Image (spheres, rainbow, N blue to C red):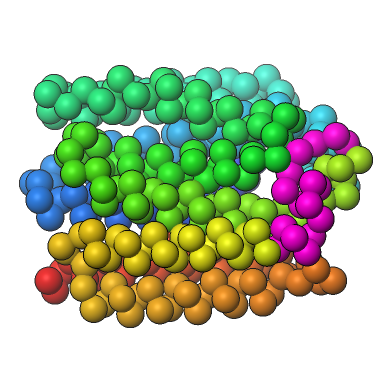
Amino acid sequence: MPTVARKLLELIRFSHTIFAMPFAVLAAALAWKDEPARWQDSVGIILCMVFARSAAMAFNRVVDRRIDAANPRTAARHLPAGTLSVGVVWVFTVACSAAFVASTLLFYVREPENPWPLYGSVPVLLFILGYSLAKRFTSLAHFWLGAALMLAPVAAWIAVKGLTDMTVPLLLGGAVAFWVGGFDILYACQDAKFDKEAGLHSVPARFGIVKSLRIAAACHCVMFGLLVGLYFASPHLGVVFLAGLGAVGTLLVYEHRLVRPDDLTQVNRAFFHVNGVISLGLLAVVLVQLAIK
């Protein structure tokens, strides 16, 4: 059993929760400046993030198992390689989905006047799971993923404050959407040839590597602009946040310098390392800002 649990965590790349979790915490931290912080909110946000992402990743691996088996880059994953059974991963997906919906009850018990986390749990879950099917019919799949991760800060804000003062979470969520869409396009450049031959849809498969890198760069410019907008929209952000934005901009430039049309060997470094630093770094900057302002 411990071996199965370990393989399931590897299957969903549990450590990569780092990409979305900090933005949910960041949104909650901004909301808590105007609302009392409650332990139910903290626990609920963490549980919802973990279970929603775990369900989505496990579902992705199940529905993509034949595609993964045909792609040399992904053929060694657990389901194509046979180190986990389809049945086990399906059970894990359903269990995580149920746990996600159940976790939203923490917000309802704490404040029945704010039922939106519970009401939205099933539609949000279906939207997140739907990303795994998107590349079968649209090249906008990268932006579907971005919109799915956008829900992390937006939902965290709603869980704390309800449907009030939505400018701040929408700006933050929009920044996450374009950030994720941009770096997912970079990541998909590795499979441009395979996707085209397999009849799958992606920006690199449709437009080629060179144009895709430009589209990804444009997405990250939009992301940066939305973060600047967040600075002006939130009364709680100041000079520390601005300094952090400078660092984020530098890291984005570095990320795009790593990935070149004639050299995609640094994609994983750009995808996992640089974006992890951006996510955690931005959270740290905001927490410092909120602590001193």
> How many badges with numbers are in the image?
0
Instruction: Please say if 116 is above or below 4.
Output: above
Whether residue 99 appears in this view of the structure is no
Going 14% across and 29% down the picture, which residue do you hit? 110
Q: Residue 145: give x, y in percent of width and height.
A: 56, 42
Residue 208 among magenta residues: yes
Q: Residue 67: give x, y in percent of width and height.
A: 81, 34
Going 35% across and 75% down the picture, which residue do you hit? 244
Q: Is residue 239 left or right of residue 191?
A: left
Q: In this view, does 61 lie to the left or right of 176?
A: right
Out of 12 and 244, give the one closest to the viewer.
244
Read off the magenta span.
198-213
Instruction: Check the picture and name the quadrant holding the C terminus.
Output: bottom left
Whether residue 246 appears in this view of the structure is yes
Instruction: Check the picture and name the quadrant holding the N terminus.
Output: top right
Q: In the rendered image, which quarter is residue 130 located in? A: top right
Q: Residue 154: give x, y in percent of width and height.
A: 33, 42
Instruction: Please say if 238 is above or below 90.
Output: below
Going 14% across and 74% down the picture, which residue do you hit? 292
Instruction: Please say if 281 is above or below 189.
Output: below
Out of 108 and 175, give the one closest to the viewer.
175
Q: In the rendered image, which quarter is residue 61 located in? A: top right
Q: Is the magenta stretch mostly helix, strand or loop?
A: helix
Residue 48 among magenta residues: no
Going 58% across and 62% down the picture, which residue do you hit? 218
Q: In the rendered image, which quarter is residue 163 located in? A: top left
Instruction: Please say if 50 is above or below 112.
Output: below
